Image (cartoon, rainbow, N blue to C red):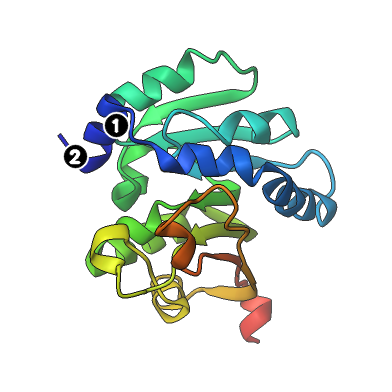
């Protein structure tokens, strides 16, 4: 069992409480993604979707939303929500091409990337880049690399950028810490927004 499988089994899922407490601020970030696009919005991939906390909202907003997670029990729980327009697959975010999901216009990572080691982070970055349509965007929430990193996980902006060398960092915003509780509210969480570079960007 992975640590997340154990967490779901024993009901220790603080990231779900955060999603509820910070719903307004997260909705604002989703609004930004939509306002910069014409409709139809395209396809969105929720990386490490868990029990489908954000995937249904993406679907309701008009995305063709896909959630992927490596915990089968979490995926089954997500499927039971029965949200129209949302689909779920059991898969590994560090080997996305193997899941045969097609390409995407938007990627969401809420706390998944930060829990990977350096090799796995590079693998996720490579997979996301492979599946990204031109000018796709990525929205990622991650803790900062505090002294509690070994327990609570976290990454630096440099580590995010190193894993996504083909992407441009558009924004780095401090995340709302309400609902996190101690000690997670001391981890300096950030929202990172990146865009897949095209040949025009490097010309």
Q: Residue 13's spot in the image, x, y percent? A: 39, 36
- Which quarter of the rendered picture does the N terminus lie within? top left
Residue that appears at 44% across and 28% down: 51
Q: Is residue 196 left or right of residue 89?
A: right
Q: Residue 194's spot in the image, x, y percent? A: 60, 67
Q: Residue 124's spot in the image, x, y percent? A: 36, 57
Q: Residue 145's spot in the image, x, y percent? A: 37, 74
Q: Is residue 70 above or below residue 167?
A: above
- Which quarter of the rendered picture does the C terminus lie within? bottom right
Residue that appears at 22% across and 33% down: 6
Q: Is residue 196 above or below residue 139?
A: below
- Nearer-the-camera pick, 131 or 94: 94
Mark 2 to mark 1 CA distance (whole Å): 8 Å
Mark 2 burial class by Cα count in 10 Å: few <14, some 14-19, many 20+: few
Badge 2 is on which residue? Answer: 2
Disc 2 + disc 1, Cβ < 8 Å: yes
Badge 1 is on which residue? Answer: 71
Compare marks 2 and 1 and give the one earlier in the sequence: 2
Q: Seen from this angle, which residue lies furthest left?
A: 1
Quarter of the rendering containing residue 155: bottom left
Residue that appears at 78% across and 55% down: 32
Which mark is on residue 134?
Answer: none
């Amino acid at each position: 069992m992975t640590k997340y499988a154990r967490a779901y089994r024993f009901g220790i899922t603080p990231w779900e409480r955060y999603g509820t407490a910070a719903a307004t601020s997260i909705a604002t970030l989703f609004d930004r993604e939509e306002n910069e696009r014409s409709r139809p919005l395209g396809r969105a991939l929720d990386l490490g979707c868990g029990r489908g906390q954000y995937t249904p909202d993406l679907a309701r907003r008009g995305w063709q939303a896909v959630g992927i997670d490596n915990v089968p029990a979490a995926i089954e729980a997500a499927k039971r929500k029965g949200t129209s327009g949302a689909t779920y697959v059991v898969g590994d975010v560090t080997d996305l091409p193997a899941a045969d999901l097609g390409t995407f216009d938007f990627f969401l990572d809420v706390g998944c990337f930060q829990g990977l080691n350096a090799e796995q982070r590079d693998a996720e970055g490579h997979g996301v880049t492979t599946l990204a349509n031109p000018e796709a965007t990525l929205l990622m929430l991650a803790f900062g690399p505090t002294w509690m990193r070994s327990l609570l996980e976290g990454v630096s902006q440099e580590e995010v950028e190193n894993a996504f060398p083909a992407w441009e960092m558009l924004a780095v915003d401090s995340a709302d810490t309400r609902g996190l509780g101690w000690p997670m509210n001391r981890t300096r969480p950030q929202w990172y927004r990146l865009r897949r570079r095209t040949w025009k960007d490097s010309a």
